[in-house]
Each structure stands twice: as structure tokens, then as C-alpha cells.
Amino acid sequence: MAKMLYSVTMSLDGYITGPGGDMSWAVPYLKPNPLVDELIANIGSLLVGGRTLGGDDPHRGTEREGKAFGGGWSGPQFVLTRDTSRTSTADLTFVHDPETAIRMAKEAAGDKYVNVIGAETARLCLAAGQLDEVLTIVAPVLLGGGVRLFDRPAGDPVPLERMSLSSTDVVVNIWARVVK
Ligand SMILES: NC(=O)c1ccc[n+]([C@@H]2O[C@H](COP(=O)([O-])OP(=O)(O)OC[C@H]3O[C@@H](n4cnc5c(N)ncnc54)[C@H](OP(=O)(O)O)[C@@H]3O)[C@@H](O)[C@H]2O)c1
């Protein structure tokens, strides 16, 4: 059974984008990270939020722009969006409700991970009781504003259990499971 993993690069002050959705801040931290290489080999599908698909890309202006993990991964992607005008392709399926998107992404992933991309999408998975793990790649930068890792101002605490802690020269990887 596939597990659902929210993996994301986050600033030290808890943002996954800069103000206005800017992602150029992440460029200095896109260095080789053995843990991410290991993860990529274990991803069976992606569940991508509509704002992520249309959002900024730290690979902007390069041949890696618009590709999953900068071109490091390929396979079935499920995009959660209210926009019904988009046409699905072989690898990109547009889905219009979270429950169906989660089900389809899990079926496609087999025994591997569904990698969840986008904070709101991850929150929806959590609310549905479907989020299993969170991999936060912490970058040593303060952004001051933007999209938060998890914006649940009125929410109860969500206990996490650390699975691994590792680092490269530039980032710290914190991998945790959601305690259910
Ligand atoms: N730091 C990182 O590692 C990293 C990684 C990935 C992305 N990002 C950034 O994160 C930002 C996106 O995150 P986000 O939290 O703002 O958004 P998101 O999770 O990517 O997408 C949210 C979108 O999901 C769709 N949606 C939500 N609820 C829905 C429902 N009930 N039914 C159907 N569709 C629904 C809507 O898409 P529509 O608007 O299309 O209808 C909504 O705008 C982007 O700026 C991206 O660049 C950062």
C-alpha cells in the first residue's frame, strides 16, 4: 500500500515560498542531497496542487524548468485543481476533488510513495487522515513571508515522530511520520 509523503524545502522561518510565491530563494540550496536521490527512487506518483503546477520554479530559465524534481523523476502525476478546462495527458491527470485525487495517486504509486507537492494539498491529505510522512529540507535562510509549511492557525497540534535526521553542507533533512 502506498504511503503519502509531503516533501518540501523550507526556510528556517517556516516558509516554502518567498513573498508572492517567489522560488528563486531556493536556488542556492538545490545542491546534491543523497537523501533526495534515495527518495526519488522510491516515488511511485506525485499529487500536485494546482498552485504548484502554475507556480514559480527555482529552475526557471533553465532546461530543468517545469519538470518534476528538475527532470530527475518521471511517472504519473495527479494535479488537484478546480479548473475543469485542463485536458489530461498520458502522465498528467487533472482531478477535481481531494478524495479522488488521493485514491488515484495511491493506486498509481503501488508500493512506493505518493509524493505530495504543495502546502494546501498536504493539509487536505492530513485532514483526510491520509498523510503518513513529512520530509522537511530546512534551508538556512529567513524569508519573512510567503506560503507556510502548514497553515492551520486554529488546528490542534499534529504529533510527528522523527524517522531520520541528516544533513548536507547546505541543508538539514528532517524526516518524520505522522502519529495516527
Ligand atoms: N519549497 C518547496 O519545496 C516547494 C515545493 C513545491 C511547491 N512550492 C510552492 O508552493 C506553492 C503552492 O503551494 P500552495 O499551498 O499555495 O498550493 P498547492 O497545494 O500547490 O495548490 C492548491 C490548489 O489545489 C487546488 N485545490 C485545493 N482544494 C481543492 C478542492 N477541494 N478541490 C479541487 N481543487 C482543490 C486548487 O487549485 P486551482 O487553483 O488550480 O483550482 C488550489 O489553488 C507554489 O508557489 C509553489 O511554487 C514550494
Image (cartoon, rainbow, N blue to C red):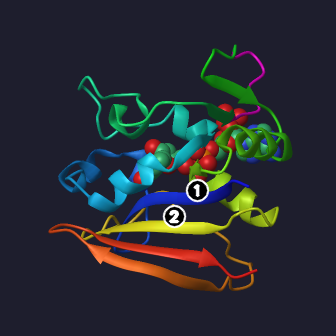
In this view, the residue farthest toward the left is 169
Q: Which quadrant does the N terminus fall into?
A: bottom right
Q: Is residue 121 above or below residue 138?
A: above
- Answer few, some or many: residues within 10 Å of disc 2's Cα (few below 14, many 20 plus, some between 14 and 19): some
Q: Is residue 161 above or below residue 56?
A: below
Q: Residue at x 52, y 65 (%)?
A: 149
Q: Which residue occupies the foreground of this view, 159 or 91?
A: 91
Q: Which quadrant does the C terminus fall into?
A: bottom right
Ligand 1, seen in the image, is in the quarter at: top right
- Residue type marked 1: Ala
Residues in magenta, as a range: 80-86
Q: Position of residue 104 (x, y in %)?
A: 77, 38
- Residue type marked 2: Arg
For mark 2, what is the residue?
A: 148
Mark seen at residue 106: none
Q: Position of residue 36 (x, y in %)?
A: 36, 56
- Determine the image quadrant of residue 57: top left
In this rendering, position of residue 99 left or right of residue 77: right
How far apart are labels 1 and 2 at the CA level? 7 Å
For mark 1, what is the residue?
A: 119
- Determine the image quadrant of residue 161: bottom right
